[in-house]
């Protein structure tokens, strides 16, 4: 079993603040790194998939980076809004299996 | 362009009964994944299937649980002789190809065991 760790576990930020959180994963057996956004009472929504070292992806105010050599990915949110409040899940996939982090619970305070 | 469809949305069973959860992947998706979310916990991977094949079932309990994804029809997660600890939300996701593709999730089935 491989450990995917996310930090912090939870985070409160003021509306308008920018924030970021971390996903660390073992470099061995790496195939892809996924970020999902999961709102309460809904199903997870795919944000990004990254496969190459140095990959950067952007979707509106949210962006992510990937470092496969040192085994981490950052997710950034610029100018947080209350609707960004959700749990952000990091998932590492090997060729045939998936390893979930426990998520970072973000609360944006209006 | 329907997304991943799971049914039923809510399922209530008594201890010892069988639970069958269905998942129809998005059109064109041949890879299906099942996850379980126990109360107060995150998503846990259970099983990964491709049409007619189980690719990885390392997250699925060895007893009472089984999954299939037949050539025709939805994927089925089957839990025999359910116990209280099986109460959870069960999510299904699908992707067009393998595990480097983003997964699209269904709304989940909430299983309650009386």
Image (cartoon, rainbow, N blue to C red):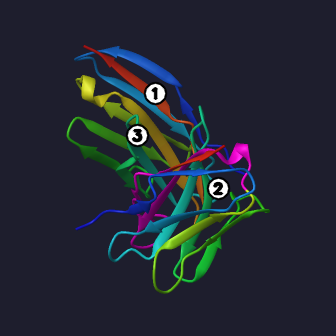
Mark 3 and mark 2: span between their CA atoms? 27 Å
The residue pinned by badge 1 equals: A105
Image quadrant containing the C terminus of chain A: top left
Asked which secondary structure carries label 3, the reply is strand
B83 inside magenta stretch: yes
Q: Position of residue B101 (x, y in %)?
A: 41, 64
Q: Which mark is residue A28?
A: 2
Q: Left or right: A17 with respect to A22? A: left
Circle nearer the N terminus (2, 1) = 2
Regarding residue A96, the answer to whether it shows in the image is no
Q: Report in which chain the residue with disc 2 lies.
A: A
Do the CB atoms of the residues marked 2 and 1 lie less than 8 Å apart? no
Circle nearer the N terminus (3, 2) = 2
- Residues drawn in magenta: B82-109
Residue at 39% x, 27% y: name it: A20
Q: Which quadrant of the structure image shows residue A12? A: top left
Q: Which quadrant of the structure image shows residue B48? A: bottom right
Circle nearer the N terminus (3, 1) = 3
The residue pinned by badge 3 equals: A38
Residue at 40% x, 56% y: name it: B106
Q: Are marks 2 and 1 on the same chain?
A: yes
Q: Left or right: A76 with respect to A89? A: left
Q: Are marks 3 and 1 on the same chain?
A: yes
Q: Report in which chain the residue with disc 1 lies.
A: A
Q: Position of residue B26 (x, y in %)?
A: 35, 69
């Amino acid at each position: 079993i491989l450990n995917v760790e996310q930090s912090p576990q939870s985070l409160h930020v003021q509306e308008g603040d920018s924030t970021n959180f971390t996903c660390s994963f073992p470099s061995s057996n790496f195939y892809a790194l996924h970020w999902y956004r999961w709102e309460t009472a809904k199903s997870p929504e795919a944000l990004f998939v990254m496969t190459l070292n140095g990959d950067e992806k952007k979707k509106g105010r949210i962006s992510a980076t990937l470092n496969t050599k040192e085994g981490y990915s950052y997710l950034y949110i610029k100018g947080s809004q209350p609707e960004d409040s959700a749990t952000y899940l990091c998932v590492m996939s090997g060729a045939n299996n998936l390893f979930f982090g426990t998520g970072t619970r973000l609360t944006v305070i209006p | 362009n329907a997304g991943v469809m799971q049914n039923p949305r809510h399922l209530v069973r008594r201890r010892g009964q069988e639970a069958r959860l269905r998942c129809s992947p998005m059109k064109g998706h041949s890879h299906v994944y099942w996850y379980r979310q126990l109360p107060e916990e995150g998503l846990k991977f259970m099983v990964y299937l491709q049409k007619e094949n189980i690719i990885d079932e390392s997250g699925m309990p060895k007893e009472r649980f089984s999954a299939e994804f037949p050539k025709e029809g939805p994927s089925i997660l089957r839990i025999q002789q359910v116990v209280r600890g099986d109460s959870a939300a069960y999510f299904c996701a699908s992707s067009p190809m393998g595990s480097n593709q983003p997964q699209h999730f269904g709304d989940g089935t909430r299983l309650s065991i009386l």
